Image (cartoon, rainbow, N blue to C red):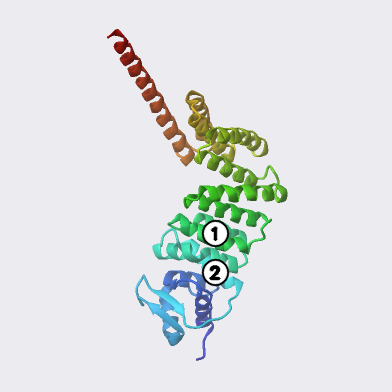
Amino acid sequence: MALGEAEKRVLDVLIAADSGPALPIAVLAAACARLGGSPSEVDVRTMLVSLGPLVARGAAGTPDEIVSSTLRGFSDLRVHAAIADAAAMLAPTSAAANRYAEATEAEHLWLAGRPEEALRSLEARPLAEPALNYERWADWVPRFHPTSLLGIQAQARCATWTGKADEPRRAIQAFVALLPTAVRHLSPCHRETLSIRNNIAYLVGALGDHRKAMRLFAQLVIDSTAALSATDEETLHNRHLLAWTTAKCGFVSVALHQWRQLLSDVDRELASNHKLAFNIRDNIDFWTAETRARSSRGRNWTHRHAAGADR
């Protein structure tokens, strides 16, 4: 079968997409357009007809059409880049493109020679279940050099999802093992190193040792302020978790004072509708109510004790 340039371009895209799910027709057309072809789905469908048995089509002729190739082969970096960029462009407005991007964008970026963007894609497009995210990150970790920035970040994300998959002790072991590598190959004040320390402190608190967690966060606030700034988002998060561990240690009035000071900084530096601002307000409301409830229980106990003594 003699193929024209347009048909070859469509086939190149389909062969590059072979390792993942079938390609939505809109992503196929957009990828072809990035490689110099027609952006029209009508034109792409005409070419699919001419390709005959070289392609497989599902829901042909509908907006939900998906396409794959019956051929196998190696693909150019440019083709993988075109698919990844097309899916990312369409994902915000197309459910089919979004699903495809969630499943394949990182892999296409990796095969396009864009490893940092591949890692960012994995971060931005988590799967529905924590265990599945852990498995995906565990599969990706060996692709990176273990002492490179991307390698350390991949190991840290894998540890994060270990904790979210209800394995906090394994997660803290992974973070503690990773910290010396980050200190040695990045620096003690690198953002990723500080993030690893944040995760260790948080998990220490989550496992019940609130006093140790409070000490770790107190030092982390000092170090992240010096390394990043007092108003950097990482520092603000550390201040929030310092207040949380302070409250968990029983120093609620101190924690409420810390949160109220922090809230004005978060509103100014991030936004009043930032997730951290909502978390701070929720904690202020919760611990304020808890303090009032404890005070009320104390008054009731005193009243009952006095009444009993009178009798």
- Quadrant housing residue 239: top right
Look at the picture and state if 5 lies above or below 298: below
Quadrant of res 97: bottom left
Query: Who is closer to the viewer here, 79 or 116?
Result: 116
Please state if 75 lies on the left or on the right of 53 as rendered. right
* Residue beneath disc 1: 137
Name the residue at 57% across, 58% down. Answer: 119
User: Relative to 163, is 207 above or below?
Assistant: above
Q: Where's residue 302, x and y in %? A: 35, 15
> x, y percentage for residue 108?
55, 67
Amino acid on which disc 1 is placed: Trp
The x and y percentages for residue 197 are 61, 43
Q: Going from the N terminus, do you reach mark 2 or mark 1 first? A: 2
Q: Is mark 1 on a helix, strand or loop?
A: helix
Q: In the current view of this chain or complex, which residue is farthest to the top?
A: 310
Q: Give the secondary structure at mark 2.
A: helix
Q: Which residue is drawn at 54% across and 63% down?
A: 106
| Amino acid of disc 2 | Ala
Viewer-closest of 158 and 37 = 158
Q: Is residue 109 left or right of residue 299?
A: right
Residue 82: assigned label = 2
Rendered view: 264 above or below 3: above
* Residue 293, percent from left and from top: 36, 24
Q: Is disc 2 in contact with disc 1, using a CB cutoff of under 8 Å?
A: no
Disc number for residue 236? none
